[in-house]
Image (cartoon, rainbow, N blue to C red):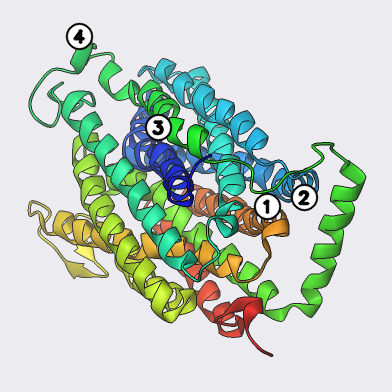
Amino acid sequence: MATQRQRIWGWWFFDWASQPYNTLLLTFIFGPYFAETARGYYMGTGMEEEAAKAAAQAYWGFGLTIASVFVAIFAPILGAVADGTGRRLVWVWFFSAFYVVGAAGLWWVSPGGEAGMLLWAVFFFGMGFIGMEFTTIFTNAMMPSLTDKDDIGAISGSGFAFGYLGGLLSLIIMLCLFAENSATGKTLIGMDPLFGLDSEAREGTRAVGPFTALWYLVFMIPFLLWVKEPKAGSGRINIGAAMGSLVDLIKSLRYRKSLLSYLLSSLAYRDALNALYAFGGIYASNVLGWSITAIGIFGILGGATAMIASWVGGKMDAKYGPKPVIKWSIIVLLVVCTVIVGLDRTAIWGIALDPASNTPDVIFYICGALIGAAGGPLQAASRTLLVRHTTPDRATEAFGLFALSGKVASFISPLLIALVSYFSQSARMGISPVILLFLIGLILLIWVKPKGEQAVS
């Protein structure tokens, strides 16, 4: 029988194991590589470079939209089923298979600019993305059972910090040993990709898929050994009862103003943040012309600030509550996004910059550090605030609804970015919808009780 401390560490290891999907695939390695590949395809059809960049960003956005819609539809239903049966771990392992197969399948996305290859990339990335999202829902739902003390905020923040450390380490390994610079064929430390991988075929960069899958399999072992079901259940699936429970929960939202406001607020701000993660590397590739190696260094900086800030944010959450942490994180991200939308190699919001200087790069590095410093605490405090609005026996259902609220915005934000990118023919302006989403989230936070439904009315 695992001790409470082992259960907490096992639960933290899920964050460590799963974070590379976001760090390596979504943001800093595979996402930019996909942008390069898609851009080459569109330019090969005769499209001008700027239009090709926008088209590549739009393709990625539409792919994320489809995967997010799938999560939005099924997350609350499966959450209700899991709470009704008292079984969550079986779903963790079921969707872990999606994660591993989807990540590993990205190995075959070779450079060559073929339409079928772009579809393959989006299909397998979407499969892994769905797996990552669902496993997160079910593991988050176990958080209330980890402790009977008032230290959920610190546990959540430390978990995110530990996860970001894992993501940071995996990124450093990829950049130093595998991911090659497209111009030189060398890794960050000037060596050929490990194991004789062919740099011309971009095998070092493509190895990010199998590497992410293997990382997950290895580091889920502590979770497997130490994390058990928080309560016994019948194990029998009753779809009718699950749907009835979910319908009752949704109907109750009209009487639960704080929870409803929080779900709507998080609908906007969490997936504006997800959009930053999903398109940040693509933006750096398209707008600033960065190589994957440069984007990876950017990721190391952002991961380091996220790790430190998540741990500090967890302490602040435990002391002051999650709502102030969320509010100030959103404000920082609003400022950063406003800067990013006005930035390119020649100017920042109409103020001319020397195109040959590294000023735009320095500004974007600062923005990356701030995104990490605000994004980590924002995610950690968000799941803490939801715990304050639910009970352990209905936590999966609540986190499923939480995922639904997030995935509605994850459906909207990639779609808005794809549409704005497509019609404006500008990858830079395509990012602008996230500013509005962060602002909406900040305003709706006004009606959220700091202690959730634990507050005394």
Give coordinates of residue 233: x percent, y percent: 77, 43
Q: How busy is the neighbourhood of tag 2: few (under 14 within 10 Å), some, or many (20 plus)?
A: many
Tell me which corner region of the image, top left, top right, bottom left or bottom right, holds residue 192: top left
Q: Earlier in the sequence, mark 3 or mark 2?
A: 2
- The residue tagged 3 is 219
Tell me which corner region of the image, top left, top right, bottom left or bottom right, holds residue 328: bottom left
- The residue tagged 2 is 80
Q: Nearer the viewer, residue 310 or 68?
A: 310
Q: Is residue 245 visible?
A: yes
- The residue tagged 4 is 196
Q: Give the Cα separation between the discs numbered 1 and 2.
A: 7 Å
- The residue tagged 1 is 396
Q: Amino acid at mark 3?
A: Phe
Q: Amino acid at mark 4?
A: Gly
Q: Is residue 199 left or right of residue 433?
A: left
Q: Give the Cα separation between the discs numbered 1 and 3.
A: 23 Å
Q: Earlier in the sequence, mark 4 or mark 3?
A: 4
Question: For numbered disc 4, what is the local secondary structure?
Answer: helix
Q: How busy is the neighbourhood of tag 3: few (under 14 within 10 Å), some, or many (20 plus)?
A: some
The residue lying at 48 percent from left, 25 percent from top is 121
Q: Is residue 399 left or right of residue 310?
A: right
The extreme bottom residue here reads 457
The answer to whether marks 1 and 2 mark residues whose Cβ atoms lie closer than 8 Å is yes
Q: Is residue 145 left or right of residue 108?
A: right
Q: Amino acid at mark 2?
A: Ala
